[in-house]
Image (cartoon, rainbow, N blue to C red):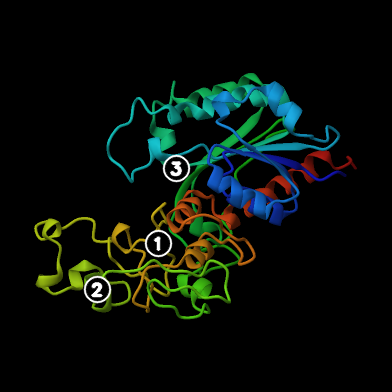
């Protein structure tokens, strides 16, 4: 049987593609607007085509002329449309944000390709934006009109072997019969009772100082810190926050503010990490302080907490690489989805006894 082919829309640097490839699927193409993420995708998926397009400007005709897909093999379309319009990271409503409608653009490619499988991943907020006539509601109605079975759930990444507290909406659809989102692989009641923790994933990396890079490990590079921020983190214990600083080191904007205590915080060694954002190497933007060293996470540490392997290299500036990592689907989460889809395909295509 031919391997399931994958076309990864909004592929970014390739988190979903890496997980699906790990599961045994064949990544044939990625599509994304971001040229820096595209450079990383090209580097790590030399076997796949990459289209540097805004999907709104990509016709199905140009798509078909640019990508060769084996019609005899089953096809999976994966998509993680940019999630900023739906995330809780920013509270400002962006009703006019065109990215809120990018999921609608997927309809015409599904109609054109009629893939056997569809995998969509996004932030939970997508489910709450006008469920009846919003992008997710429209997408679900569209799937029904095309004859797809589907399942959609809000998942916790740490339930699937990712060392990070990250809630994601996942939708799996199939043209071959009823399908479900896979059950958790980690946590109470599973074969892996313990969740993956930070130290298991980054504790073996060589020590570096803020602003330094380790030549032995690709992308093991940490952002520099000002003298005052070095002093602040030196006084922050493992799992601690700005509340542990003496009064004279506290920022004026925090002195009468009790919220946002994760900013400038250190991670715990024995817990999953906080959700990584596009600023996951910045001490002032979340609980991204290294558990023991006086610096924020390095690029490689952030990538490991997104379950990228060390042979997955990132290109671009520090800020660009952090954005690519923060926007990525955790590799291990995508791998579990891929294995589940392979199992489903084997069950629905197995000869009847």
Sooner in the amino-acid sequence: mark 3 or mark 2: 3
Instruction: Classify mark 2: helix, strand or loop.
Output: helix
User: Which one is nearer the viewer's eye here, 3 or 177?
Assistant: 3
Identity of the residue drawn at 20% across and 55% down: 259
Where is residue 271? Give x, y as percent.
42, 69
Sooner in the amino-acid sequence: mark 1 or mark 3: 3
Q: Is residue 353 left or right of residue 60?
A: right
Label 3 crowd (10 A; few <14 / some 14-19 / many >=20): many
**Quadrant containing the N terminus in the rendered view:** top right
Q: Is residue 98 above or below residue 222?
A: above
**Quadrant containing the C terminus in the rendered view:** top right
Where is residue 318? Give x, y as percent.
45, 59
Sooner in the amino-acid sequence: mark 1 or mark 2: 2
The residue labelled by disc 2 is: 227
- Disc 1 or disc 2, which is closer to the eye? 2
The residue labelled by disc 1 is: 281
User: Which one is nearer the viewer's eye here, 252 or 179?
Assistant: 252
The residue labelled by disc 3 is: 123
Q: Is residue 131 above or below residue 239?
A: above
Q: Quadrant of residue 113?
A: top right
Identity of the residue drawn at 44% across and 65% down: 272
Q: CA distance from mark 3 to mark 2?
A: 36 Å
Q: Quadrant of residue 253?
A: bottom left
Q: CA distance from mark 1 to mark 3?
A: 21 Å
Q: Is residue 256 left or right of residue 307?
A: left
| Any part of residue 147 in sight | no
Q: Is residue 218 left or right of residue 72?
A: left
Q: CA distance from mark 1 to mark 2?
A: 17 Å
- Disc 3 or disc 2, which is closer to the eye? 2
Q: Is residue 291 above or below residue 134?
A: below
Instruction: Classify mark 3: helix, strand or loop.
Output: loop
């Amino acid at each position: 049987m031919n391997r399931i082919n994958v076309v990864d829309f909004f592929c970014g640097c390739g988190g979903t593609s890496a997980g699906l490839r790990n599961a045994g699927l064949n990544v044939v193409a990625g599509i994304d607007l971001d040229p820096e993420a595209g450079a990383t995708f090209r580097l790590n998926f030399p076997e796949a085509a990459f289209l540097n397009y805004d999907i709104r400007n990509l016709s199905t005709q140009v798509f078909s002329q640019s990508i060769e897909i084996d019609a005899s093999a089953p096809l999976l379309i994966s998509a993680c449309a940019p999630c900023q319009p739906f995330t809780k990271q920013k509270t400002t409503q962006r009703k006019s944000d065109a990215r809120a409608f990018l999921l609608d653009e997927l309809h015409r490619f599904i109609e054109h390709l009629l893939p056997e499988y569809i995998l969509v991943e996004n932030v939970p907020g997508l489910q709450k934006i006008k469920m009846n006539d919003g992008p997710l509601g429209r997408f679900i109605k569209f799937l029904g009109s095309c004859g797809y079975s589907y399942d959609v759930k809000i998942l916790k990444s740490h339930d699937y072997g990712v060392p990070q507290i990250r809630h994601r909406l996942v939708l799996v659809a199939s043209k071959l019969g009823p399908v479900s989102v896979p059950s958790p692989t980690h946590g109470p009641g599973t074969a892996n009772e313990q969740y993956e923790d930070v130290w298991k994933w980054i504790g073996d990396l060589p020590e570096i100082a803020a602003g330094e890079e380790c030549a032995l490990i690709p992308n093991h590079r940490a952002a520099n810190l000002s003298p005052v921020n070095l002093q602040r983190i030196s006084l922050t214990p493992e799992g601690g926050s700005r509340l542990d600083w003496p009064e004279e080191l506290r920022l004026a904007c925090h002195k009468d503010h009790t919220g946002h205590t994760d900013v400038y915080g250190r991670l715990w060694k024995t817990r999953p990490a906080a959700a990584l954002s596009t600023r996951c190497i910045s001490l002032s933007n979340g609980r991204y302080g290294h558990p023991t060293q006086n610096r924020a996470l390095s690029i490689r540490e952030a990538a490991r907490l997104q379950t990228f392997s060390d042979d997955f290299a990132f290109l671009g500036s520090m800020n660009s690489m952090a954005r690519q990592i923060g926007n990525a689907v955790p590799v291990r989460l995508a791998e579990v989805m891929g294995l589940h889809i392979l199992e489903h395909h084997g069950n629905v295509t197995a000869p009847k006894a």
